[in-house]
């Protein structure tokens, strides 16, 4: 704001991000750690002032539950337009957006949002479910379907669990 008063505006523009192309590029140039999407979820739990986070590992998925939160979070707008850039700037929605985009780029086929018998499924091509069911939340369960290619490698699964325990 202060910089805007110091000079005159000489141009303006718009930024358009093609999400499918961005995911392909992220997958192509990502770091070796394919599980970087878990850190933003822990940041989300911290920003949401959660008193408990549960992480469960299954052969075909990873379940993350963020429970007993002090702050309410309205996911309805974000779930209706999950790739929209304005949500990336939000202090509590930005980490969720980052986690989902990195997971999808890493090959996670679907992310299931669940809360009190309601569900929403997010995939690379879009979402299915009712976003308006996810307003005013104090708890949220996410299930990330595992990429089949590397999930069945027991050594990597043990290493992944060790990294998660160390991160917590």
Image: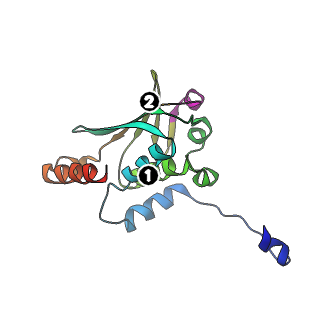
**Residue 89 shows in this picture:** yes
How far separated are the C-alphas under marks 1 and 2?
A: 18 Å
Assess disc 2: are there few (<14), some (14-19) or many (≥20) residues with their C-alpha within 10 Å of its C-alpha.
some
Quarter of the image with the N terminus in it = bottom right
Check the image and report above or below for 40 versus 28: above
Estimate the x, y position of residue 11 in percent, counting from the top left: 80, 74
Residue at 57 percent of width and 34 percent of height: 72
Disc ID at residue 91: none
Assess disc 1: are there few (<14), some (14-19) or many (≥20) residues with their C-alpha within 10 Å of its C-alpha.
some
Colour approach in the figure:
rainbow
**Are the residues at dot 1 and dot 2 in contact (C-beta closer than 8 Å)?**
no
Residue at 34 percent of width and 66 percent of height: 31
Residue that numbered label 2 is attached to: 114
Q: Secondary structure at mark 2?
A: strand
Estimate the x, y position of residue 63 in percent, counting from the top left: 33, 37
Apparent side of residue 108 relative to residue 96 in the rendered image (left or right):
left
Residue that numbered label 1 is attached to: 40
Disc with the residue nearer the chain's start (1 vs 2):
1
Residue at 26 percent of width and 53 percent of height: 166
Estimate the x, y position of residue 9 in percent, counting from the top left: 83, 74
In the rendered image, residue 142 lying in the magenta stretch gets the answer no
> Residue 52 is drawn in which quadrant?
top left
Q: Nearer the viewer, residue 40 or 107?
A: 40
Q: Nearer the viewer, residue 16 or 40?
A: 40
Q: Secondary structure at mark 1?
A: helix
> Which marked residue is nearer to the observer: mark 1 or mark 2?
1
Estimate the x, y position of residue 48 in percent, counting from the top left: 51, 41
In magenta, the rendered stretch is: 128-137
């Amino acid at each position: 704001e202060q910089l805007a008063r110091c000079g005159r505006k000489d141009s303006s523009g718009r930024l358009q991000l093609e999400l499918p192309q961005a995911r392909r590029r992220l997958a192509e140039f990502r770091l070796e750690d394919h599980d970087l999407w878990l850190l933003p979820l822990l940041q989300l739990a911290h920003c949401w002032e959660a008193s408990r986070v549960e992480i469960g590992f299954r052969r075909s998925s990873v379940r993350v539950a963020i429970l007993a939160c002090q702050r309410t979070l309205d996911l309805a707008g974000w779930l209706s337009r999950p790739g929209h850039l304005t949500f990336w700037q939000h202090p509590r929605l930005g980490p969720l957006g980052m986690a989902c985009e990195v997971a999808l780029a890493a090959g996670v086929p679907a992310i299931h949002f669940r809360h009190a018998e309601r569900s929403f499924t997010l995939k690379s091509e879009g979402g299915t479910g009712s976003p308006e069911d996810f307003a005013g939340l104090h708890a949220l369960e996410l299930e990330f379907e595992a990429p089949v290619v590397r999930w069945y490698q027991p050594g990597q699964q043990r290493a992944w669990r060790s990294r998660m325990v160390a991160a917590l």
